[in-house]
Amino acid sequence: MTEQDQDRDPWEEFDRLSPAGPDKVAGYPGGEPVGFGFRTGVRSAKVAIGFAVYALTLGTILVVVGAVVFIGESQWLLLGLMVLIEAVFVLAFRRLVAQARRRR
C-alpha cells in the first residue's frame, strides 16, 4: 500500500454516492418488507419453515443430551425441566409454522 492509500478515508467512496431512494417500509433501509408476521424479511414460507425445523432439531438435540446426562446422574427435577423446555420448543415450532403459512 502506498502512503496515499493509507491516508484516504475508507468511507469517502460511500459519501460520494447518492441515496438509493425512499424506503418502501419506514425505518427499513433499502425498503425491505417486514416479512410475514415476524421481522425477518423472509418472503418465502419454505425458508421460514426450514428455519423452524432447524431450530426445533437443534433444541431437541440439546434437550436429549441434557436428558441423558440428568438420567445418568439421577437428577429427576432437572429432567422434568428439560421435558418442559422441549414442550416450549415444540410450541414455538408450531407458532413459527403457523406464521409462515399465514404470511402477508
Image (cartoon, grey):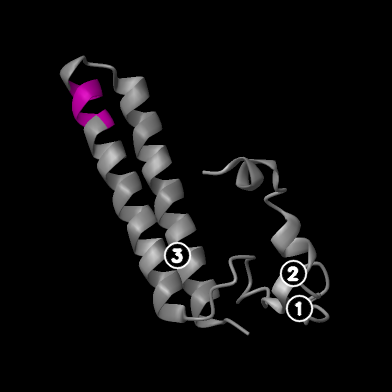
Q: Where does residue 37 sit, x and y in percent of width and height?
A: 63, 72
Q: CA distance from mark 2 to mark 3?
A: 31 Å
Residue at the extreme top: 73
Residue drawn at the location 62% of the way across and 40% of the way down:
3
The disc at residue 29 is 2
Which mark lies nearer to you, 1 or 2? Answer: 1
Task: Identify the residue under disc 3.
Answer: 94
Q: Quick one: label 3 or label 1, which is nearer the N terminus?
A: 1
Q: Is residue 100 above or below residue 16?
A: below
Kindly state the secondary structure of the residue where label 1 is placed: loop
Snapshot quadrant of residue 56: bottom left
| Residue annotated with mark 1 | 20
Q: Position of residue 13 (x, y in %)?
A: 70, 62
Q: Are marks 1 and 2 in contact (CB under 8 Å)?
A: yes
What amino acid type is highlighted by mark number 2? Pro
Secondary structure under the numbered disc 2 in the rendered image = helix
Which residues fall within the magenta stretch? 66-71
Does residue 70 appear left or right of residue 104 in this picture?
Answer: left
Q: Amino acid at mark 1?
A: Ala
